[in-house]
Image: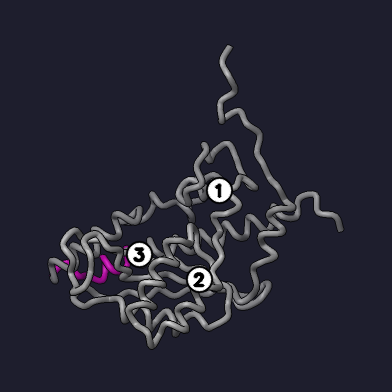
Amino acid sequence: MGGLGINSMKDIIDAEKIREFLAEFSYPLYFLDFETIYPAVPLFEGVRPYQQIPFMYSLHWIEEEGGELHHAVFFSYPGRDPRRYIAEELCADIPKGVCTVAYNMCFEKARIRELAELFPDLADHLMDIHDNMKDLMVPFRRKWYYTDAMEGSYSLKVVLPALYPDDPELDYSRLDGIHNGGDASATYLAMWQDPDDQTPEKCRQLSEYCGLDTFALVKLWQKLKVKSLVNKKL
């Protein structure tokens, strides 16, 4: 007799754990995602082979409960070391003391620590962002919220369609040219190597992809808020 496969499992929603997790969040909320390059042959002095170098980020934010959703993308054009520009703009865009949200935040935190070490004059602000970051992956990794469609994974690209099936607004496959982080890195490196390839269209594709990453975080957070109310005692 065969055992029950994961597709026959019931959905799991631990509303109490989700409520406790979300209670650590506070407005204003900033949702952050970096895009990076990691070339085998370093482009800049003092950089290791395959070191992750951020060249753009997307930021969605909400100032208050029920407030408007805002969005900004910062992109450093190829031909210059993007790290100083990224660090300065990040400090300009994210105030001190606010709650910043990422997915698998160890990646974003590592990039921010590297920027802080490289630019001591910005380190205080950068580390404030670092220290006030929350990881939206936690409820999915710990299976406080689990559905059959996740198939045992808590990757963003799996969790998102599992929670929002058939939503064209959240479908990475509909994007033009760039569908994942590897595509984004390859596109930026191609633009670096060929100035004629630095077209507004490529910039638009990069911005659209990175923007969807942070919009996805907003949608996951909203879904968690709804599920946190399940069986809540009023």
Which one is in front in this view, the residue at disc 1 or the one at disc 2?
1
- Given the image, on which type of amino acid does mark 2 rest? His
Asked if the residues shown at circle 2 and circle 3 are in contact, with their CB atoms under 8 angstroms apart, the answer is no
Q: Name the residue under label 2.
A: 60
Tell me the element at label 2.
Answer: strand
| Residue located 52% across and 83% down the image | 95
Query: Is label 1 in a helix, a strand or a loop?
Result: helix
Q: Give the range drawn in magenta.
A: 196-205
Q: Residues within 10 Å of mark 1 (few under 14, many from 20)?
A: some
Q: Which amino acid does label 3 sit on?
A: Glu
Q: Gap in Å between the C-alphas at discs 2 and 3? A: 15 Å
Q: Is residue 126 left or right of residue 35?
A: right
Q: Is the magenta stretch mostly helix, strand or loop?
A: helix
Asked whether residue 133 appears in the rendered view, the answer is: yes
Instruction: State if disc 2 and disc 1 touch (CB < 8 Å).
Output: no
Residue at 30%, 59% (x, y): give it: 184
In the figure, is residue 110 to the left or right of 147? left
Position of residue 102 measured from the top left corner of the image (x, y, whole percent)? 50, 63
Which tag, 2 or 3, sits closer to the chain's start?
3
Q: Residue furthest right?
A: 234
Q: Nearer the viewer, residue 130 or 206?
A: 130
Front in this rendered view, residue 169 or 234: 234
Q: In this view, does 152 lie above or below 55?
A: above
Looking at marks 3 and 1 on the same chain, the residue that comes earlier in the sequence is marked by: 3
Q: Earlier in the sequence, mark 1 or mark 2?
A: 2
User: Relative to 40, is 148 above or below?
Assistant: above
Q: In the picture, residue 115 is in which quadrant?
A: bottom left
Image quadrant where residue 176 sits: bottom left
